[in-house]
Amino acid sequence: MSTMQVANRRLSRTIQLIPPSGIRRFFELASSMEGVISLGVGEPDFVTPWNTREAAIASLEKGYTAYTSNSGLYELREEICKYLAAAFDVHYSPDKEVVVTVGASEGIDLALRAILDPGDEVLVVEPCYVSYDPVVRLAGGVPVAVQTSIEQQFKLMPQHIEEKVTDRTKAIIFCFPNNPTGSIMKKEELAKLAEVVKRHDLIVISDEIYAELTYDTSHTSFASLPGMKERTILLSGFSKAFAMTGWRIGYAAGPEDIIQAMVKIHQYTMLCAPIMGQVAALESLRHGMEAKKRMVESYRQRRNYVVKAFEQIGLPCHKPEGAFYAFPSIASTGMTAEEFAEKLILEQKVAVVPGHVFGEGGATHIRCSYATSLENLEVAIDRMDAFLRVYK
């Protein structure tokens, strides 16, 4: 960005140098047009299950409208700990090792601000969720991109870390199952990373918001590996697997010293997550597992359809094993990802996200969310097929 673009003395230089979200740009464009099928924003098409909504309504009727503890409702923290132990074999105390956040996104921000001093480097594994790089910068850190590739199914390898780590590296942040690629890491693959993490004394910020959305194997939490719990901040929430995006309830679990530092920031900036959302999240953990299973099975069916369909219309696509995104290659079209996405929405009214917004490794890809109905996916594929026929 040029000097002219940071000439506003009223704003910080840091914020002026951070671009607006590339995802939101296409979401807003789609919202302004009629008849658009959006494969853009990563949001379930399911409404929050009724029992969860009913629990929140009942809490309002009972007058539950006050602040909670800064760390969140104790009952919810207890239930989160029980859930993590049962589902992923990772064990935390609800007293000092868990904080309820305003979505997992706030958890990322709190974690980085709690551990970073100005100039500390953070390895950011790409392609990745669009907020990682900006939030590292906002916390005073220096993001260092670590590229994965389609040739290795977008998995993180030990050598990727070794090539980028320096004596200024404080932490590494990654998300598996991955947004935007749908890639996962198996237990034996994570174990190899753990050796490198320990050797370089890194703090791991493990974004596991899509942990429940795995289709061909079970999820392994990085914190469950030997020796990794004490150096891992586990981030998750209720938006994706429990269809609760608008409720904005997430959580962080980790070592007491780090979690309590996060609580300190949280109490000065956010105070607490909304009590109604916390009550709803508690209901989801206690009585929402069957609904979650049904949603995951629906995503599996859509995943199977969309991957095969992309291959048939000439867009090579590795099979995502988690999350609800496909990341097909558009290299054969000769267009940039941004050019492809802009022409597709203007000419065929299908919204996708150009892969470059997730990092350099996504430059020849587009992200397509299959968290929409099968009927919408079929129409979207037909329109994309027509689009490709014109440009071929």
Image (tube, rainbow, N blue to C red):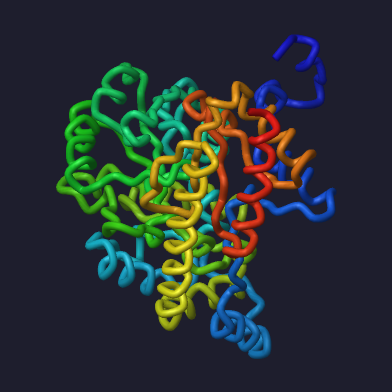
The quarter of the image holding the C terminus is top right
Residue 73 lies, in percent from the top left, at: 48, 72
Q: Quadrant of residue 338?
A: top right
Instruction: Give the residue drawn at x 24%, y 47%.
Output: 186
> Does residue 281 appear to the left or right of 75 in the view shown?
right
Q: Is residue 294 visible?
A: yes
The quarter of the image holding the N terminus is top right
> Does residue 199 appear to the left or right of 65 in the view shown?
left
Residue 86 lies, in percent from the top left, at: 26, 70
Q: Is residue 71 visible?
A: no
> Does residue 187 appear to the left or right of 164 in the view shown?
left
Q: Nearer the viewer, residue 278 or 309?
A: 309
**In this rendering, is residue 324 above or below 58?**
above
Q: Nearer the viewer, residue 53 or 226?
A: 53
Residue 259 lies, in percent from the top left, at: 39, 51
**In this rendering, is residue 320 above or below 44?**
above
Instruction: Give the residue drawn at x 47%, y 33%.
Output: 127
Q: Nearer the viewer, residue 256 or 143?
A: 143
Instruction: Give the residue drawn at x 43%, y 83%.
Output: 287
